[in-house]
Amino acid sequence: MAKVVVFTKDNCIQCKMTKRFLNAHNVDFEERNINQHPELIDYLKGRGFQAMPVVDANGVDAVSGFRPDVLAKLA
């Protein structure tokens, strides 16, 4: 199974939808909140991301936003 990391921020509807989708499909993931860990912001910007959530999983290109098409590949 792919290791899945979801980068989120507070009060983010797309973040909540992404986590809800993964939970509904029994996909284990690790959440990393940029409000709690602001050092992650530079890391994500360095990878070209400017919007949350960012889903990073082995075997799939990292994506931002709520992307059920990509998330379904992890289920």
Image (cartoon, rainbow, N blue to C red):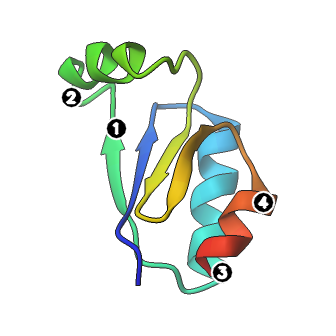
Label 1 – label 3 distance at C-alpha: 20 Å
Q: Earlier in the sequence, mark 4 or mark 2?
A: 2
Q: Earlier in the sequence, mark 1 or mark 4?
A: 1
In screen coordinates, is 65 left or right of 39?
right
Q: Earlier in the sequence, mark 1 or mark 3?
A: 3
Label 3 – label 2 distance at C-alpha: 26 Å
Residue 4, percent from left and from top: 41, 64
Q: Earlier in the sequence, mark 3 or mark 4?
A: 3
Q: Which residue is mark 1?
A: 33
Q: Which amino acid is tagged 3?
A: Ala
| Vertical placement of residue 43 versus 59, above or below | above
Q: Which residue is mark 2?
A: 37
| Vertical placement of residue 3 versus 5, above or below | below
Residue 68 circle label: 4
Q: Which residue is mark 3?
A: 24
Label 3 – label 4 distance at C-alpha: 12 Å
